[in-house]
Amino acid sequence: MRDLLLGREPHDLDIVTAARPEAVTALFERTVAIGQEFGVVAVVLDGHPYQVATFRREGPYLDGRRPSYVEYADARADVLRRDFTVNALLYDPFTRTVWDFVDGRGDLDQRIIRTVGDPTERFTEDWLRLLRAVRFAIELEFSIDPATFAALRSLSSSIAGTSAERIRDELLRLLLAPGRADGVRLLESTGLLAVILPEIAAMAGVPQPPEFHPEGDVLTHTCLALQHLEPPTAVLAVATLLHDVGKPPTFSVADRIRFNDHAEVGATMAEAICQRLRLSAAATRAATVLVRDHLRIRDLPRMRPGRARQFLQRPDIGDLLALHRADCLASHGDLEIYHWALRALTEVAATPPPRRLITGDDLIAIGYAPGPLFAEMLEAISAAQEEGEITTPEEARAWVRARFAAGGPSGDAEPPRGVEPAP
C-alpha cells in the first residue's frame, strides 16, 4: 500500500485476511503451508505463489527475531505488531478503502520513518529493524522520526545479534539505492556502521594529501565515489565501498601523506569482509579483484600495446573503468585516463586479435607438462606477438625456448612477469 500511495511500482504484495489457514486452503485449488505456525499459506495462481497471512498478534520476542507465541487476532492488532507506520497500511480491495490505525498516511505525507508504537520495543522484537529503518529512509528519501532515531542510536550495537546473511541483504539494497552515499553517512551517524563495517567506520578522520584529494578524509572520498556511480551492480557497489579500505592501516607521513600498498592490503581486507557478510564466492572474488586492481587503470597509457590490449579484454573491465571514473570524480576530477581507456577499448573491440602463433599442444610438444600456467604462458606469448616481437610460429617456439627449458628456466633468462616455467 505504501508504494501505491507514493506513486511507486510495488515490488511485492502482502496479503492479510481474517480467514484462518484452513479456510484459505479450502478456497483454492493449489496451496502450500509455508508458515503454518504463523498462519501463512502460499496460494498458487497461474504458477505464481502469493503469501496469504491470517491477522495475528504476537507474544514477547525473546531472541531479537522471533515471537514467543502467535495467536489469531483482528486487523488492528495485526497492524500494531508491524515495524514502521508507513508499512502498516492496509487496503481493502472490495471497499477500495485504506485502513490506517497508526497514522501511516500522515507519515507518508511528512516523509517520515517512524516505528509503530514504542521504538525500543519495536527494535527489540527484531534487531534487523535497526538497519531496515536506515534502508527505508534512503530508498524512500525520508527522514527518521527523532524518537525513532534516538532509540536506533542507543540500540545500534544490538545489530551484532543479527545473522550476517540478513545484514548482507539489507546492506546490498542500501548500496544499490540512488542515495547510497547518504546511506553510508546515516549508518555512521546512527552507530550501525561501526558495528557491521568497522573497517569503513575507521576511514572517518583519516586525512589524505590535499593535492590529490581536496575533498577531505577517506570516508568522505568513499561516499563521494559511491555517489558518482551510475546504477551499479552489487559487486561494483561493494568494491567501491571497499576500494580504499586499506588506507587507514597503511597511513603514514613522510615527504607527504602516503598509503603504501593500500590496494593490496585493501584486497586482503575486502576478501575477509565479503566472506564475513556471506557474499557468494564469485561475488567475493570479483569485488576483491576490483579493489586490488583499482589503481592499475592509471598505468594503461604507459603499457606496451599488447599488454594494454590484454588488460582491456579482461571480463571485469566495465566495472573496473566505472570504479576508476567514480574514484577520479570523488577526488581530483581528472578523467583524461578514463576517456583514453574508453577510446582504446573501442579500438580493441573493432580490431580482432591475431591468430595464435602457438597453442597448448605446441607447448606440450616442446616439453612442458599441461597445467594451469599454460594460460598465463600463452597470454605472454600473445602479448609478445601483438607487440611485434614474434611474427611466426617458429619465432614463437624459439621465444619460449629462450625463456624456458622443458624442465625449468634456462640459464639466467627471466620469464615474462607472472609466468613460471612448467615443472
Image (spheres, rainbow, N blue to C red):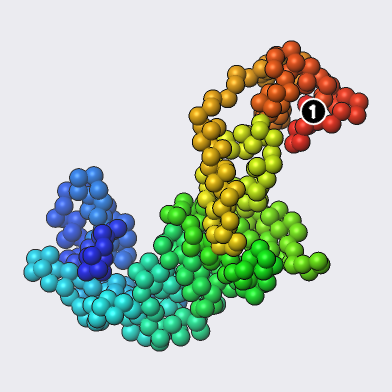
- Examine the image and state in which quarter residue 46 appears: top left
Answer with left or right where residue 294 lies relative to residue 108: right
- Residue located at (69% from left, 41% from top): 302
- Residue located at (39% from left, 72% from top): 137
Answer with left or right where residue 301 lies relative to residue 403: left
The residue wearing badge 1 is: 421
Q: Secondary structure at mark 1?
A: loop
The answer to whether residue 303 is visible is yes
Q: Residues within 10 Å of mark 1 (few under 14, many from 20)?
A: many
Disc 1 residue type (three-letter): Pro
155 lies above or below 402 = below
The answer to whether residue 327 is visible is no
113 lies above or below 359 = below
Image quadrant holding the C terminus, namely: top right
136 or 301: nearer the viewer: 301
- Residue located at (60% from left, 48% from top): 337
Image quadrant holding the N terminus, namely: bottom left
205 or 25: nearer the viewer: 205
- Residue located at (66% from left, 63% from top): 212
Q: How many marks can you see?
A: 1
Where does residue 270 sit, x and y in percent of width and height?
A: 63, 57
Answer with left or right where residue 200 lies relative to residue 176: right
- Examine the image and state in which quarter residue 173 appears: bottom left
